[in-house]
Image: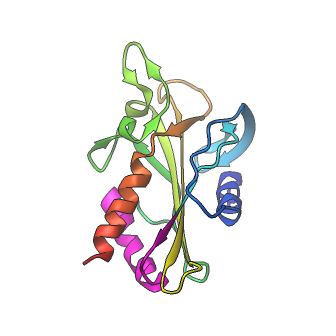
Amino acid sequence: MTTKHLLLLSLLGACGGSASSAAPSPVSSAPISRPTGAGNMRVTASDPSTVHILPYQPDQVWRALPGVFDSLGIEVADLDPAKRMIGNTRFKVRGRLKNVPLSRYIDCGTSTQVGPNADSYDVSISLLAEVRPAESSGSTRLTAIFDALAKPGNFAQDYSQCSSKGALETRFIDILNARLKR
């Protein structure tokens, strides 16, 4: 399990009770080990998690999640039914995610010659979801963690943190709600 994976899982376990969209904090650098090799990653102290209370049973939400990931074009690679955690912490993509430009979901800076870096860089996405019973009977507390790193494909640079625009998280919940209403 990579350092990044452990960081995401520890964040998932420490999430608060409301949706989070903290402003970015100062940037620091941390060594990481990824499937593509070791390197450094720029890290901000912002919380990449969002929490949603859904008016559905946890089992019902859990069963719908694989289809949500598929609809987004993200293969499920991390699955823990005992903890009800599902997602992918090492999904590599370039340019588009299921025909949607990555720049619609994340901000990785802009190049004056190419435009949004998210659309031309090598991007590594992490999206994890955890299902737990909510305090109110019959409801579910869904915690989702979305994170993205990017680097130019043509240069030997380290991955840099991208910031979420909130659109992927919104789309995730919209697809999930549509599946649950069926």
For residue 35, side relative to residue 120 (left or right):
right
What x and y, as percent, mark residue 108? 49, 31
Residue 69 is inside the magenta segment: yes
Residue 63 is inside the magenta segment: yes
For residue 127, side relative to residue 13 (left or right):
left
What x and y, as percent, mark residue 4? 66, 52
Q: Nearer the viewer, residue 54 or 98?
A: 54
What x and y, as percent, mark residue 116? 40, 26
Which residue sits furthest front?
136
| Residue at 46% in and 85% down | 59
Residues rendered magenta in the picture? 52-74
Figure quadrant of residue 159: top right
Figure quadrant of residue 24: top right
| Residue at 45% in and 84% down | 57
What x and y, as percent, mark residue 147? 55, 48
Above or below residue 91? Residue 134 is below
| Screen quadrant of the N terminus | bottom right
Q: Magenta span: helix, strand or loop, mainly?
A: helix
The answer to whether residue 79 of the structure is visible from this angle is no
Which residue sits furthest top?
112
The answer to whether residue 80 of the structure is visible from this angle is yes
Q: How is the image coloured?
A: rainbow
| Residue at 70% in and 55% down | 7
Above or below residue 154? Residue 38 is below
